Amino acid sequence: MCDKKITAFEQQYLTRRHALIKSILGVGSVQLRSLITGVPAALLLGNSHRALADEGDFKYTIFSHLSDGDPLNANAPGTYAENNADPRNYVQHRSDGGGVTGYENGVDFNLGAARVKAAEPWSTLPEDLRSRLGFWHHGTYTNAHSDHRHVIRFHGAIKDQNGAGSAQLAEAMADETYQGLNTILKEPLSVGGSSITYRGRAIPVLRPSAIKELFASSAANLDEMVALRDHFIDSTYKKMKREGTPAQLKFLDRYALSRVDAQEIATNLGSLITDIEEDNPSDQVKMAVALLQLGIAPTVTLGIRFGGDNHGSIDNEVEQTGYAMKDLTIMWDKLKAANLQDKVVFASLNVFGRTLRYNTNGGRNHNGMHHTMLVAGSSIKPGVVGGIEPTKPTGTPVEFKATGINSNNRTSNNPDIAYRDTLVSAGKTLAKAAGLSNERINIRFNGGKIITGALS
């Protein structure tokens, strides 16, 4: 019997795969090197690391970050009028008709015990997801796409581990939870959405399709990965034995996985992502949950779209909101299948929201005065936080902005959180939802206060 010949295409694929794996253990991504070897990136970068986990009930975090400025805020709970005297009657929603329903007047439905009104697609989310879904209204204080990097730093209000300098939201959350979660990585992973950094270093976007290709369930692929991993561990251990401290050697011993363990990680990840086909938001959420399920990283960022930069028309607002409901449902189903539904906090934070009144083209302009953060988790009290008010005190409203927030009852009545502090207060509240102590929250976030009424 003749040996099966390898086609030119197959040879090209094998060569590309081998080069990819070689580059990862050489000058490639620290995140993927850590994923393959099972050795935390802190050690790969030569950084010290405390071996013992902090006490606390920490949760993984998934963040959706986009610099487009999605119009999620334009059809979410909190933007629909409850009576004839309500100024929100002047908020302009997509007119029903032409196959579109449930936007113009909204529909009533429950978020847990809270009765709300919003665009109809929100009511289609699974009831058990809606029982831990919150819509937090706040400002981002900018109208420029390029300021996204400043918004995810809360304009300098998020500090480093020592309470100085500045940090991004995903960076701070990863810093504070990775030890308690005992993840392989200490830094966030990005599988989509807008770019993030970690301590000044750009975090590469690891596209789901590329990760799937790397961890394809091929015996040859796994054998090659394990062999390269064993070589890396051996060379690192020799160096540590010559130059490292006893603590570093002990740390390496702890994370130097056996051949079987390393192969198990690769096999398990490969089996979890078989249904990934592209790099769209649905595939991003599938990959995010798989990475959390294997304890790879404490935080994953991605990008779920709700309409994008829609100056000229709001058609995308309707179409993409429908797709987003599917993405959120997929994420929820995957979390439940992995038994992670009580161990993950999800939140969206874009550069700004959109105007609630149409522009002359029938679209929506940038609105740094009002953004709606979509949050979900077992520690989140379902419902609306804060509210909106006209920017013009009398007559027909020309636009709307976020109100201040009452931290105890989460409404806009008698606020003790000023509008200018709503963004950092949302961040502090997310940190509390993820298990951070009040002491660490006050070190990492400057200003604002925890919205206790938003937490269950």
Image: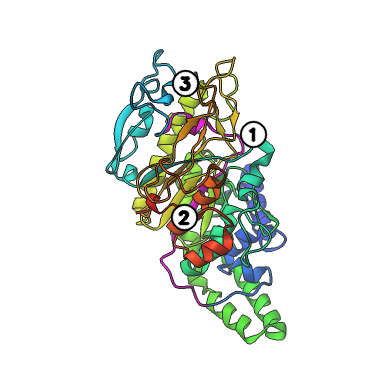
Q: Relative to residue 167, is residue 253 depicted above or below?
A: below
Q: Is residue 237 left or right of residue 271?
A: right
- The secondary structure making up most of the magenta span is loop
- Of label 3 and label 2, which has the lower sequence position? 3
Q: Which image quadrant is residue 51 in?
A: bottom right
Q: Nearer the viewer, residue 382 or 299?
A: 382
Q: Secondary structure at mark 2?
A: loop
Amino acid at circle 1: Asn
Q: Position of residue 292 (x, y in %)?
A: 47, 57
Q: Is residue 143 left or right of residue 375?
A: right
State the residue position of label 2: 450
State the residue position of label 3: 92
Amino acid at circle 3: Gln
Q: Is residue 281 left or right of residue 201?
A: left
State the residue position of label 1: 143
Q: Position of residue 10 (x, y in %)?
A: 61, 46
Q: Answer whether residue 2 is visible to the viewer in this image.
A: no
User: What residue sits 68% from the left and 81% below the top?
Assistant: 240
Amino acid at circle 2: Ile
Q: Relative to residue 252, is residue 195 depicted above or below?
A: above
Q: Position of residue 448 (x, y in %)?
A: 53, 53
Q: Nearer the viewer, residue 50 or 443?
A: 443
- Of label 2 and label 1, which has the lower sequence position? 1
User: What residue sits 47% from the left and 33% below the top?
Assistant: 388
- Give the magenta part as a residue range: 52-76
Q: Nearer the viewer, residue 236 or 450?
A: 450
